[in-house]
Image: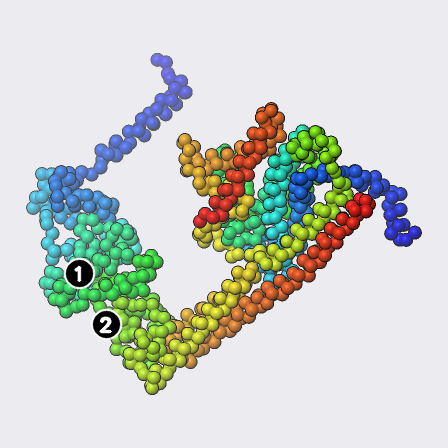
């Protein structure tokens, strides 16, 4: 028998490899797991079909978590799919939800398979929350996992479509906490989210798109949701406002303010405080307790006046530098001084929490030196501009004389016929 | 005999200066109603001289590295005696030189001074114009400020769109994938060594050709002179025209000093490669027309990338501009009229696009 040549063998090997390669997707398709729940529910209409579509694009769907994990049953065998023997639960009762979710999400070994950094304390936290405590006492109206996360369409918190994405948390909480009738039964106001939406925190989150800005869960926690107690308010705020909290602790207000930071700033409707927030003018926080006659009032007025005066000086210096810059003078280095002055002003504003004018003044003094240097640089640049403009007359004048002389010279030479 | 006379005699015995200067003494300049356009070439030459003088002074303090370039320019502007004046004159003079070169080129094109035997004068002139634009592009990056950085980024990206060789050109220009300190170093080398060397050689050739063929008379004036020889008027180049040119140079110097005093060239803010491009960033005015064209051109024209088509269009335009004398000759009798129409359209297009580019946000 004639054997095939090495070239023919090579070609045949190549063709076989290609055929195998092309056949691979079909082979894979054939090994895809069967899900009889999806097969049937996909053919149904309305509420019975929706879970199929929602689950497919959910975080669970992406990780291959099948229907049977929550609903029990056998998703691979249509004959036993809903049999009691397969543990089929069907519709899940509301009271079962926290424990059902916790069965996986509180299981460290299970969750580690998906992501070793995933938290597993949600159920434990929930049990300590106001929601969890009331739920344990049989209140069916308080939030359970699905109220915030959704049911079949659960997405990860980093997905902007998720109700627990930082941008959507306030709206998710508002579904219950802005329901006046529901909140009335708990003796709670229903204005928290409305107030929050009018706050600097909401502005930072929704307008500036700063996802690190505080939302409801930042202060109240998410799964362990609870109103911070009077003593822990300063601790909650100090998570971000470290220096303010430190200065507040040193201030005479520490013992006087039963509600800590919220005494001046309110709890949810927190506006950006300007320098008029301190002092005794209308709208200031200090005027609620102090008058012009008491030491605190005098102190507050001094703080306000010193801050306002310094801010005005910095603005003046900036305007001066702007004039010099528009005249083409390079005052870039003076910009660093202005930055330093503004930094000192910010620090001084933080020092307001000490409620001591002397401490505020100490910060302003550092800034004042920088502001003076910036002002001097601006004035010097403007003087230099004027000097240059005056000095310009010398070369331009000399050139004018030369040009005129050249003109006369040409005319005289051409008239005399010398050229 | 005084000392100066003795030095002159000593030189004359060894090198006949008079003989060397004779061609200049014999050189004449036609006098007619368009004679003032003749000043533009000399003005461009003067501004080139200013560039060399101020450039050499800037070299004493400028440091061509990403970590020092901006600071050294700041130092020149704020600490060096008259540093602000030298740098501002260098920048303003660069812009006036580009303007004068363009004006000179268009005056030559409208006067059809490129006609035989001056084709080579035209070609060396167009090369000089491109070299001047090269000076502008390479020098713009050297202060290493934000505007310069992004303008260079966009400019080199445009070069990168040239089919087949574009990417290689872009990598070569940038010294890598992106505009970095390596780009600054090679732009500096290009600006102070390569381009000046080529420009000086080309300038000498251009001047030699002008000297050899004399100054061209516009075709319309030449026809009039042929009909009426009594109207023909000329003046000696040296000293009659030269003294007039000297007046123009002095006036240009005064304008430069005034501009540098009232509008000193800005230092800008230092490059931050990680910062986003500032909104509304534009190239220098002499690249605005091309920039605006690329902005307005549709993304695709008949399955061809619009930007690539635009760049090919610029290439074709440049090639046609080079070949203007030959195109006119090829077109025969109608050549002069068609070329004049083409030059008018080119000028209108460049001016209109530059204005649109300047006004556009």
SS for callout 2: loop
Determine the residue positioned at 68% across, 32% down. Answer: B224
Determine the residue positioned at 55% across, 44% down. Answer: B286
Chain under label 1? A
Residues packed near mark 2 inside 10 Å, few (<14), some (14 to 19) or many (20 plus):
few
What percent of the width, then of the height, locates residue B70? 56, 56
Say which residue label 1 marks: A176
Residue A229: mark? 2
Q: Looking at this view, is B97 or B32 the one in front?
A: B32
Q: Residue furthest top?
A: A1
Q: Residue furthest left?
A: A84
Image-based side of B304 in relation to A160, left or right: right
What percent of the width, then of the height, locates residue A9? 38, 21
Residue B229: mark? none
Work out whether B212 lies above or below B288.
above
Q: Residue A296, located in which quarter of the rendered image?
A: bottom left
SS for callout 1: helix
Instruction: Please tell me which of labels 2 and 1 falls first in the chain.
Output: 1
Residues packed near mark 1 inside 10 Å, few (<14), some (14 to 19) or many (20 plus):
some
Q: How many marks?
A: 2
Q: Residue furthest bottom?
A: A293
Chain under label 2? A
Q: Residue A264, located in which quarter of the rendered image?
A: bottom left
What percent of the width, then of the height, locates residue A203? 31, 61
What percent of the width, then of the height, locates residue A39? 15, 38
Q: CA distance from mark 2 to mark 1?
A: 21 Å
Image-based side of B313 in relation to A209, left or right: right
Determine the residue positioned at 58% across, 46% down. Answer: B136
The chosen color scheme is rainbow
């Amino acid at each position: 028998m004639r054997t095939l040549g090495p070239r023919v063998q090579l070609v045949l090997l190549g063709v076989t490899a290609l055929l195998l390669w092309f056949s691979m997707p079909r082979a894979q398709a054939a090994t895809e797991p069967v899900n009889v729940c999806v097969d049937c529910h996909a053919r149904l209409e309305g509420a019975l079909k929706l879970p199929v579509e929602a689950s497919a694009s959910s975080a669970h769907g992406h990780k291959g978590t099948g229907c049977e994990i929550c609903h029990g049953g056998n998703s691979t065998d249509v004959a036993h799919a809903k049999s009691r023997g397969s543990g089929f639960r069907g519709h899940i009762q509301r009271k079962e939800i926290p424990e059902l979710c916790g069965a996986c999400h509180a299981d460290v070994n299970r969750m580690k398979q998906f992501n070793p950094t995933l938290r597993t304390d949600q159920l434990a936290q929930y049990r300590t929350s106001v929601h969890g405590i009331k739920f344990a006492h049989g209140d069916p109206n308080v939030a359970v996992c699905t109220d915030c996360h959704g049911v079949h369409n659960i997405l990860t918190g980093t997905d902007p479509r998720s109700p627990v994405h930082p941008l959507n948390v306030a709206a998710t909480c508002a579904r219950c906490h802005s329901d006046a009738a529901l909140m009335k039964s708990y003796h709670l106001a229903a204005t928290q989210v409305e107030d929050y939406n009018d706050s600097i925190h909401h502005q930072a989150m929704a307008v500036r798109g700063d996802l690190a800005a505080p939302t409801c869960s930042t202060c109240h926690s998410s799964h362990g949701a609870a109103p911070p107690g009077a003593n822990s308010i300063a601790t909650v705020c100090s998570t971000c406002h470290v220096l303010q909290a430190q200065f507040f602790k040193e201030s005479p207000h520490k013992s006087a303010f039963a509600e800590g930071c919220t005494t001046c700033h309110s709890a949810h409707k927190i506006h950006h405080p300007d320098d008029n927030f301190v002092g005794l003018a209308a709208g200031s926080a200090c005027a609620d307790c102090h008058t012009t006659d008491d030491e605190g009032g005098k102190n507050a007025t001094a703080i306000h006046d010193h801050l306002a005066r310094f801010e005005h000086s910095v603005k003046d210096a900036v305007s001066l530098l702007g004039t010099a810059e528009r005249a083409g003078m390079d005052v870039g280095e003076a910009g660093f001084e202005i930055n330093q002055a503004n930094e000192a002003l910010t620090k001084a504003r933080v020092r307001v929490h000490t409620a001591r004018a002397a401490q505020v003044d100490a910060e302003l003094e550092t800034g004042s030196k920088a502001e003076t240097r910036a002002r001097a640089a601006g004035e010097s640049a403007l003087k230099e501009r004027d000097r240059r403009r005056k000095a310009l007359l010398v070369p331009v004048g000399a050139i004018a004389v030369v040009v005129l002389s050249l003109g006369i010279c040409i005319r005289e030479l051409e008239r005399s016929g010398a050229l | 005999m005084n000392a100066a006379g003795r030095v002159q005699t000593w030189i004359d015995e060894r090198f006949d200066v008079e003989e060397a200067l004779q061609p200049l003494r014999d050189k004449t300049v036609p006098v007619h109603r368009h004679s003032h356009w003749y000043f533009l070439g000399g003005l461009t030459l003067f501004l080139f001289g200013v560039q060399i003088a101020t450039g050499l002074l800037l070299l004493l303090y400028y440091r061509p590295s990403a970590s020092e370039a901006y600071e050294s320019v700041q130092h020149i502007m704020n600490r060096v005696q008259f540093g602000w004046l030298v740098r501002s004159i260098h920048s303003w003079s660069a812009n006036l030189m580009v303007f004068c070169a363009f004006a000179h080129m268009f005056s030559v094109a409208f006067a059809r001074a490129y006609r035989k035997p001056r084709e080579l004068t035209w070609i060396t002139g167009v090369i000089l114009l491109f070299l001047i634009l090269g000076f502008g592009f390479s020098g713009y990056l050297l202060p290493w400020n934000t505007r310069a950085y992004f303008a260079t980024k966009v400019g080199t990206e445009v070069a990168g769109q040239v089919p087949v060789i574009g990417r290689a050109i872009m990598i070569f220009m940038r010294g890598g994938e992106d505009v970095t300190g390596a780009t600054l170093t090679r732009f500096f080398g290009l600006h102070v060594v390569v381009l000046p060397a080529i420009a000086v050689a080309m300038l000498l050739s251009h001047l030699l050709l002008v000297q050899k063929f004399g100054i061209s008379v516009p075709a319309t004036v030449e026809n009039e002179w042929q009909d009426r020889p009594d109207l023909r008027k000329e003046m000696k180049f040296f000293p009659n025209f030269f003294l007039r040119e000297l007046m123009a140079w002095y006036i240009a110097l005064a304008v430069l000093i005034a501009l540098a005093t009232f509008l000193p060239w800005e230092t800008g803010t230092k490059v931050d490669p990680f910062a986003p491009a500032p909104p509304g960033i534009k190239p220098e005015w002499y690249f605005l027309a091309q920039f605006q064209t690329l902005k307005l051109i549709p993304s695709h024209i008949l399955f061809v990338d619009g930007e690539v088509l635009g760049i090919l269009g610029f290439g074709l335009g440049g090639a046609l501009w080079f070949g203007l004398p030959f195109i006119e000759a090829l077109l025969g009798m109608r050549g002069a009229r068609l070329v004049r129409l083409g030059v008018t359209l080119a000028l209108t297009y460049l001016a209109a696009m530059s204005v649109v580019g300047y006004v556009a946000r």
